[in-house]
Amino acid sequence: MDRTSRKIEHIEHSLKLPNVSTRPFDDIKFVHQSLPNVDVNSVEIKTSIGELHFSSPIFINAMTGGGGERTTHINRSLAKIARKYNMPIAVGSQMAAIKDKKQRATFEVVRQENPDGIVISNIGSEATVKEAIEAIEMLNADALQIHLNVIQELVMPEGDRSFSSSLMRIRDIVEHMPVPIIVKEVGFGMSMEAAASLAKIGVRAIDVGGYGGTNFAVIENLRRDGTIDLFNDWGISTVASICEVKASQPFISVIGTGGIKTGLDIAKALSLGASAVGVAGLFLKELHQNGMNGLEATVERLHNELIMVMTALGAKNINGLSKAPLVIGGETFHWLEQRGIKTKSYATRVPSI
């Protein structure tokens, strides 16, 4: 199957995916503060990832492109939202446009609609330095995502089967790129071991892409004649991934992607150590079901909910939110304890009230 048809199938199947039955974010409980000493209108939600500065901690994460007019329409709509709310936006894998120049327009529309915003290019770990540069130049991008999708490739009927040189290729790209690099997992989480390997080659930002969001093992199984069910429940949750990366690599900037549904989820991800959160599936489904008005309402809801939670916790900014005490329970508690991450340190933090 050609890349264009595959992109459309991915969109169709992702729109039909049911919500996962488990909600790892529910394992995180904030310690209530009766005297928060902050006003709603004094809360700031601006943040930064390295040298990139955002007015919102929410960014529109990689979804699509390379699938003809349908993906052009989706990316145009998402870029308009990014421009209106001054949110960063990442495109889907640009390998489709690198291999087929006719697909460039499906990605270029993002920069055309959002000429002054932060736009993030996207390639896979199979890409060369030359291809990475082409992806950046295609969008005049402010940063580059390199996505890791081993599980998806293994289940994908036409997927890659060779991963032995991925780290070396990422290192080469990091050494030669003129823009910041974000290494992004695609739905299966990031371990402390992987984070350590990436840190050693100079990666300074990681999108954990945890289990709990769009599941590409399930999507690829829907495309197969015979299913491979080994990986349908595989992965490290978003919340556990954030803790794994920050506990082992405290100077790495973390983006918490995977299963973000509410402003409370965002607050929890940021409090655990993420600098920003990526949202993809929620925005794609909202756009499909309710159009631009519905998508705008969802963005407004997430921002308003986040500000309300921060107010309740006495957190005037993202730094204050990172000091809010919280209790970790359930499966996440057991996972982190088994992995040597002491959860009590989160519960005994002193809030900046």
Image: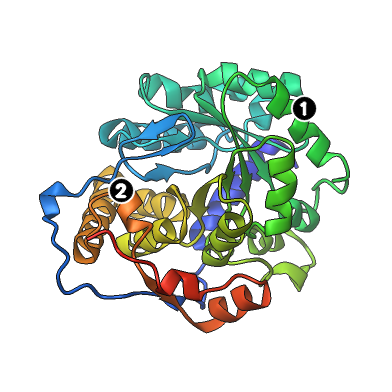
Q: Position of residue 196 (x, y in %)?
A: 71, 50
Q: Position of residue 267 (x, y in %)?
A: 35, 60
Does 55 appear above or below 278?
Answer: above
Instruction: Specify the amino acid type for callout 1.
Output: Asp
Q: Which mark identifies residue 299?
A: none
Q: Position of residue 137 (x, y in %)?
A: 58, 16
Q: Secondary structure at mark 2?
A: helix
Q: Report which residue position mark 2 lands on.
A: 295
Label 2 crowd bin: few (<14), some (14–19), many (20+), radius 10 Å: many
**If the image is split into quadrants, where does the N terminus sit?**
top right
| Residue 37 visible (yes or no) | yes
Quarter of the image where one finds residue 265: bottom left
Quarter of the image where one finds residue 47: top left
Does 31 appear above or below 161?
Answer: below
| Residue at (51% x, 62% y) in the render | 16
**If the image is split into quadrants, where does the C terminus sit?**
bottom left
Q: Are marks 1 and 2 in contact (CB under 8 Å)?
A: no
| Residue at (77% x, 27% y) in the render | 172
Q: In 3D space, how far apart are the residues under numbered discs 1 and 2 (Cα atoms)? A: 38 Å
Q: Report which residue position mark 1 lands on.
A: 172
Q: Is residue 238 left or right of residue 52?
A: right
Q: Position of residue 135 (x, y in %)?
A: 62, 23
| Residue 99 visible (yes or no) | no
